[in-house]
Image (cartoon, helix red, strand yellow):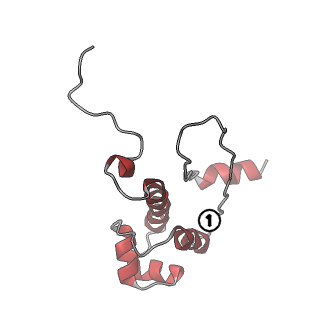
Amino acid sequence: MKKHGYVEGSGNVFADLGVANPEEARAKADLVDRIVDIIQERKLTQVQAGKVLGVDQPKVSALMRGRLTDFSIERLLRFLLLLGQDICIAVTARPHSSRKQPTLKVYATEGRSRAVAASRR
């Protein structure tokens, strides 16, 4: 077999880097990605975003720079609600025979126009 000049990732960069609680770190990063997208789509300044989220500008700056130690998943979910987003949490059973670690995933649906078009039908 020919060796590659690289190591294939696991699909979670936080696990690959050895971060503690990589599933949580990935979920937080995904939530923040959506929050930042919304702030940018609305062309909000950090001060304006802070007013919407109920935090000061330095917290918004930390959020937008990916400094997430001060933000729990619960707090990030609250931010999304304050930004007018619906949140759906699904809990599914893992097969007993599965050897995989339990996972925590965040799925963000993009494009509000699709949701609006679907609701008009």
Q: Quadrant of residue 81?
A: bottom right
Judging depth in this view, the residue of 25 and 108 nearest the camera is: 25
Left or right: residue 73 compared with residue 10: right
Count every numbered label the image shows and give the total: 1
Q: Residue at x 41, y 76 (%)?
A: 70
Q: Position of residue 100 (x, y in %)?
A: 53, 39
Give 45 or 24, whichever is nearer the viewer: 24
- The amino acid type of the residue labelled 1 equals Gln
Question: Could you tell whether 77 is left or right of 67 in the image?
Answer: right
Spot the residue most to the left. 5
Using the image, determine if residue 98 lies above or below residue 35.
above
Instruction: Give the answer, above or below, for where 109 lies relative to 5.
Output: below
Q: Report the residue marked by disc 1.
A: 85
Whole-percent x, y for residue 118 in the image = 73, 48
Q: Residue furthest top?
A: 1
- The residue closer to the viewer here, 4 or 86, is 4
Assign the N terminus to one quadrant of the image. Answer: top left
Q: Residues within 10 Å of mark 1 (few under 14, many from 20)?
A: some
Residue that appears at 52% across and 69% down: 76
Residue at 77% across / 52% down in the picture?
120
